[in-house]
């Protein structure tokens, strides 16, 4: 993820790598931030104070939130486990693995083995779970809709986050694993399958 002249890289067991990319021909490594677990995906939001909040998809470690006051200093401020059992039972049987995070308007859209979780990032609570037959490999957000790759392309209406619901499920030749929505031409969605 690139914000201004900084690139934040999800580096698996290597944590988060931060690079200065102000000179694209010669990126400069700035910092490595390790906090345990594996970083599968991340998204970065700039705060009103000019600092950055980094949301990390940390596998079975759940969603981790870090506050970066500088590119060199990040502090873990929150952790949210995602339940493997998403039924109505109050018992949790372990945690599901989260692999991607996309952030929009204060909500986190999290790819998991069991579908997509929608999280209120301010309250650090799960609003809803959208179950899918296959693990969600990727998420793209555009104008209140979430586009999921879970073998097929699944479109979720998330204009009201807590009422998110599937509105389309398109089978693909192959297995959909990456999706991009062309913001210049929102009628086009590109899917790698």
Image (cartoon, rainbow, N blue to C red):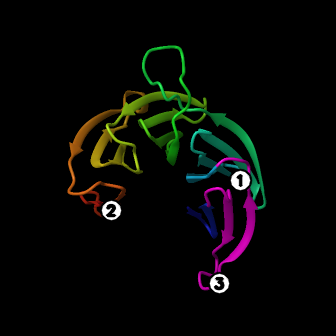
Give the residues in magenta: 11-37
N-terminal of the pair, mark 2 or mark 3, is: 3
- In the picture as drawn, the residue positioned furthest to the front comes out as 93
Residue 170 x, y percent position in the rendering? 21, 47
Looking at the figure, which quarter contains the C terminus?
Answer: bottom left
- How many labels sit on residues? 3
Camera-side mark, 3 or 1: 3
User: What residue is at 64 percent from the left and 77 percent from the top?
Assistant: 22
The secondary structure type at the circle numbered 2 is: loop
Q: Which mark is residue 51?
A: 1
Spatial separation of the CA atoms under disc 2 and disc 1: 28 Å
Of 190 and 145, which appears nearest the observer?
Answer: 190
Q: Residues within 10 Å of mark 1 (few under 14, many from 20)?
A: some
Of 10 and 185, which appears nearest the observer?
Answer: 10
The secondary structure type at the circle numbered 1 is: loop
Residue 143 x, y percent position in the rendering? 36, 47
- Residues at badges 2 and 1 in contact (C-beta under 8 Å)? no
- Residues at badges 3 and 1 in contact (C-beta under 8 Å)? no
Q: Disc 3 designates what residue?
A: 26
40 w.r.t. 83: above or below: below
Q: Which mark is residue 182?
A: 2
Of 97 and 8, which appears nearest the observer?
Answer: 97
Residue 48 x, y percent position in the rendering? 66, 49
């Amino acid at each position: 993820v690139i914000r201004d002249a900084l690139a934040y890289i999800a580096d698996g067991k290597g944590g988060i790598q931060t690079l200065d990319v102000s000179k694209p021909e010669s990126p400069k490594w700035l910092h490595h931030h390790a906090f345990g677990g594996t970083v599968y995906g991340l998204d970065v939001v700039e705060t009103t104070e000019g600092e950055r909040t980094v949301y990390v998809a940390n596998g079975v470690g759940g969603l981790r939130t870090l506050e970066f006051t500088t590119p060199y200093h990040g502090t873990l401020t929150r952790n949210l486990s995602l339940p493997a059992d998403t039924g109505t039972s109050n018992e949790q049987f372990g945690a599901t693995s989260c692999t991607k995070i996309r952030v929009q308007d204060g909500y986190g859209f999290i790819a998991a083995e069991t579908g997509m979780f929608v999280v209120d990032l301010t309250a650090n609570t799960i609003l809803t779970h959208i179950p899918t037959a296959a693990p969600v490999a990727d998420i793209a957000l555009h104008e209140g809709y979430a586009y999921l790759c879970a073998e097929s392309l699944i479109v979720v209406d998330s204009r009201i986050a807590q009422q998110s619901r599937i509105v389309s499920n398109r089978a693909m030749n192959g297995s959909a694993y990456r999706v991009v929505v062309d913001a210049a031409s929102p009628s086009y969605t590109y899917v790698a399958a």
